[in-house]
Image (tube, helix red, strand yellow):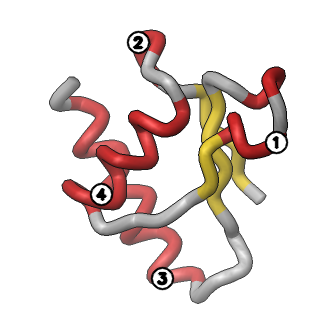
Amino acid sequence: YIWLKCPDGLKSWDLFDLLINRVYVVGTPGQGFGEQGEGYFRLTAFGDAAKTKEAAARIVAALKTL
């Protein structure tokens, strides 16, 4: 798995909403793992390598707009 720290104090569910609605990437909000997971977001790295790289590039581009 790949764990991301949510940028700019964004809550994990807010990052989930942003990624699914603007970037079409699904992950798991850290809050789903308990209180200590808030502020983090989990992505899988078990998919196709090319698709994982594409998703990562789309995430980076979206986060630059914040």
> Outermost residue toward the bottom?
48
Amino acid tagged 1: Phe
Amino acid tagged 4: Arg
* Pick the front one: 56 or 25: 25
Q: Earlier in the sequence, mark 1 or mark 3?
A: 1
Q: Which residue matches tag 4?
A: 58
Q: Is residue 51 above or below residue 12?
A: below
- Quarter of the rendering occupied by the C terminus: top left
Q: Which residue matches tag 3?
A: 50
Judge the density around disc 3: few (<14), some (14-19), many (≥20) Cα neighbours within 10 Å: few
Name the secondary structure under disc 4: helix
Q: Earlier in the sequence, mark 1 or mark 4?
A: 1
* Pick the front one: 9 or 52: 9
- Quarter of the rendering occupied by the N terminus: bottom right
**Quarter of the image where one finds residue 61:** top left
The disc label shown at residue 33, or none: 1
The answer to whether marks 1 and 2 mark residues whose Cβ atoms lie closer than 8 Å is: no
Q: Give me the C-alpha separation between circle 4 and circle 3.
A: 12 Å
Q: Give me the C-alpha separation between circle 1 and circle 4.
A: 25 Å
Amino acid tagged 2: Asp
Q: Give me the C-alpha separation between circle 2 and circle 4.
A: 18 Å
Residue at the (76%, 30%) spot, across then down: 37
Side of 26 where 33 appears, left or right: right
Judge the density around disc 2: few (<14), some (14-19), many (≥20) Cα neighbours within 10 Å: few
Name the secondary structure under disc 3: helix
Q: Earlier in the sequence, mark 4 or mark 3?
A: 3
